[in-house]
Image (cartoon, grey):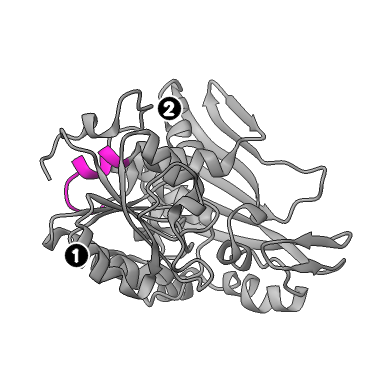
Amino acid sequence: MERKIKVFQIGCGKMSKFIFRYATEKNCEIVGAVDCNPKMIGQSINTIVENINPKITIEDDKKLEELLIQSKPDIAIITTMSTLNDLANTLRICAKCGVNTITTCEEAFFSENSNPTLHEEINRLAKATNCTITGAGYQDIFWGNLISTIASSTHKITKIKGSSSYNVEDYGIALADAHGAGFTIEKFENDIASLDNISSTEREKLIQNRKFMASYMWNVVGWLADKLGFTITEMDQKCLPIIADNDLESNTLNMTVQKGLVRGMSAVVTAHTKEGVEIEAECIGKIYTKEECDKNEWSILGEPDTTIVVNRPATSELTCADIVNRIPDVINAPSGFIPTSRLTDPKYRLKNLNEYVEKEQ
């Protein structure tokens, strides 16, 4: 593509400051932005990141369809909510308008194993208008392609085991709520943990009825099995509260999380496969104490055993860099709601992004 890629930003919170800068520095043109926060609406995107187009004003997200039709972007980037149900209307609008879309929504990473009904609806809409929708970000690399790359140097795999921790303060209110941050133990048990104390038959009914609360690793385990060619025969999920030992200030929740309240959760997903390989993945999302930091650790057990540990990853920046680097892949991909497990492997982009686009838009 000879011209700049036109990008439309949906959600102008904490992640957008990186998205705006990274996309602009890779020669993309920001053609529009929306948010639901009244305090953001009417501001120039230049107030979020300096030295980018000051003429682009953040609009009310209720005007999204109208703005997409007017601006005709090559791709929309969604950095708002964490579940597919929360993004349903936004994704429908993007698909209806035929706009390629990439989102940091964790469930969108592999939503066909947690919300197949809505996934297929969006998939049909995207195919009808010849656009591509996918979910990516930190998980695309550090919970997905990094592990599949290590697997490629393994003779025989018996188990894949992973654990990743992150500070919910870095990702906004939606993610904090999804992890029970600020909840009482009773509220956590009622709203989150109790949903896992069910049979596989009951869980499948919830999945088909769009009511299953999937932890992030539920989708990651599905993605890994899809990427590596395993057939899952059984999956289980357990969510456990992490209790504050001392009072913690939360800027995201705008409150003090008092001692004894929930500051986050650990979610462990275990899958058994037809091939005999077990996949166990844990995500730990919590409000950090001063001593804590992000950590990502994965082991592939078999012949040989391999463990990789990444301490203090810049999770927000890595998420946004993956999203921006993935832009050409999404534009080049076949139409539909496609997980990155079925896209080309991610790459570092040395040149301007438009130089990697094969399709004429």
Closer to the camera, 360 or 50? 50
Spatial separation of the CA atoms under disc 2 and disc 1: 40 Å
Look at label 1 and name its amino acid: Ile
Instruction: Find residue 327 and name its label.
Output: none
From the top left corner, tell me how far across and down residue 57 is, in percent: 39, 61
Q: Secondary structure at mark 1?
A: helix
Asked whether residue 331 is drawn in magenta, I would say: yes
Q: Judge from the rendering whether residue 271 lies leftward or rightward of residue 109; answer left or right.
A: right
Viewer-proximal residue among 14 and 100: 14
Q: Magenta stretch: residue 242 in it?
A: no
Q: Residue 361, located in which quarter of the rendered image?
A: top left
Q: Residues within 10 Å of mark 2 (few under 14, many from 20)?
A: few
Q: Amino acid at mark 2?
A: Thr
Q: Earlier in the sequence, mark 2 or mark 1?
A: 1
- Write the start and end of the magenta stretch as one range: 327-337
In the picture, measured across the screen, residue 150 lies left or right of residue 315, that is left
From what the image shows, is residue 251 above or below residue 227? below
Please tell me which residue is depicted at 67% across the width and 68% down the height of the picture. 180
Query: Where residue 68 sits: x, y (%)?
Result: 24, 63
- The residue shown at (45%, 56%) is 79
Residue 243 in view in this figure: no
User: Residue 214 appears at what percent x and percent y?
Assistant: 50, 63
- 278 on left or right of 297: left
User: Which residue is outermost to the front?
Assistant: 55
Tag 2's secondary structure?
A: helix
Q: Which residue, given by chain and number where applicable, does mark 1 sit on?
A: 69
Decide: is 354 above or below 42. Answer: above
Q: Nearer the viewer, mark 2 or mark 1?
A: 1
Which residue carries the number 2 mark?
149
Residue in the foreground of this view, choosing between 132 and 225: 132
At a point 64% along the width and 48% down the height, the residue shown is 166
Query: From the viewer's perspective, is residue 198 above or below residue 103?
Result: below
